[in-house]
Amino acid sequence: MQAKNLTRNILVGMTLGAVVGTLINLIGPDKPGLAFLVKDLFPLVGQIFVRSLQLLVVPLVLLSLICGTSAIDDVRRLGRIGVKTLAFYLSTTAIAITIAIVLAVIFRPGVGLELDYQTDFGVSESPPLTQVLLNIFPSNPFAAMAEGNMLQVIVFAILFGLAASLSGDPGKRVLALANDLNEIVMKLVMLLLLAAPFGVFALVGRTFAQEGFTAILALGKYFFLVLGALALHSFVTYGLIFKAFTGLSVRQLFFNLRKVQIFAFSTASSNATIPINLENAEHRLGVKPAVASFTIPLGATINMDGTAIMQGVATVFIAQALGVDIGLQGYLMVVVTATLASIGTAGVPGVGLVMLAMVFQQVGLPVAAIGVIYGVDRLLDMARTAVNVTGDAVVSVIVARGENEFDQQIFDSRE
Ligand code: ASP
């Protein structure tokens, strides 16, 4: 896949969309001809693109989570290492989203960008928390999939993946099939991404035609807020946790990690970075293979703190732009759903945004509004992928050190 060309094309699509949209905005979006573009053509192309993204949500979550869960092969052998790793992955992700939400609430990046999207948010009474929790558990997996109830699909996928990994040969056969299907769905994502420059052009063009410079400012705020949250989580959260649990030098950690981060940044893919991260964990960070071989691939599959940060900021941003008050319960829902969504996010470019549809569906925001941020997502994808793989490596060292599977000499050696 020509990721570089795709990045360039999406950037071109976004820039052209912004320029054309701004021009239309200056000339007057209601002028005959231009109104057709803004009200009909751009929304049509944009909607087709958004629908194609939505199409992939259920199969993506189902397959990547079944495969992800079954990566915890032979649960008993992995024992404590598995539990510890999962606990760190989940808690750091929850911290990441919390940082994202708090920053977005404080800096209010979406306020002032009045989006023209319909939302049913706030119309219906929010159900009691017990009902919300109960709703996570599916009674009919097919109904959950048909309705796009992603929390239920996720629970089903985790249970299925676990059972399959404990089922011997039948489980192995089914998991092999699930892996194959997963690859095909991934290919579909890749194929769809080829159309992204056009979809982006239409979505950004429409937004800019309608919003003008307010949109540029609002997207700029969103963009830099995500970057700020990523930097904060990367250096402060990971730094503090790393120091607290290992007592090792945080500076040395980041020095030893730079190659992995650069590779993740340029490929925007945690999956593609697995070989580099694995090699680096063993030869630069001092993590013994017994731990690294489990934690790094598992982390690339389920641990996406950078993605969760984007999802947290994006949800609050869009809610603010739509003038919707999510409320405390809504924020809690975002923390839970974005944690699960980031677990279900496959480590390839752009999937974090596909999975954002799930968070939106759960909190009642219109999925079409994701188009607003698509234009700046490719760049953010690169930055958040670097954070995603950093989290995997940090947890690997913490777990390895706690389990006496760590070589400090390797960690301390420079170059
Ligand atoms: N590109 C990210 C990764 O591979 C996933 C995403 O957020 O889209 O880690």
Image (tube, rainbow, N blue to C red):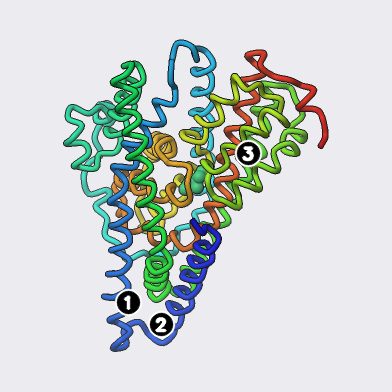
* Label 3, residues with CA under 10 Å away: few <14, some 14-19, many ≥20: some
Marks 3 and 2 sit apart, C-alpha to C-alpha, by 46 Å
- Is residue 253 rendered to the left or right of residue 174? right
What residue do we see at 41% from left, 71% from top?
201
* Label 2, residues with CA under 10 Å away: few <14, some 14-19, many ≥20: many
Q: Are marks 2 and 1 in contact (CB under 8 Å)?
A: yes
- Is residue 341 rendered to the left or right of residue 136? right
- Give the image location of residue 220, x and y in percent: 54, 63
- Give the image location of residue 67, x and y in percent: 38, 31
Q: Is residue 29 visible?
A: yes
What residue do we see at 76% from left, 27% from top?
411
Which residue carries the number 3 mark? 276
- Give the image location of residue 198, x and y in percent: 39, 69
Local SS, label 1: helix
For marks 1 and 3, give the one nearer the viewer.
3
Mark 2 or mark 1: name the one nearer the start of the chain: 2
* Extreme residue toward the right, this view: 414
Mark 3 or mark 2: name the one nearer the start of the chain: 2
Which residue carries the number 2 mark? 24
What residue do we see at 60% from left, 45% from top?
386
User: Mark 2 belongs to which amino acid?
Assistant: Ile
Local SS, label 3: helix
Which residue carries the number 1 mark? 38
Mark 1 or mark 3: name the one nearer the start of the chain: 1
Marks 2 and 1 sit apart, C-alpha to C-alpha, by 9 Å
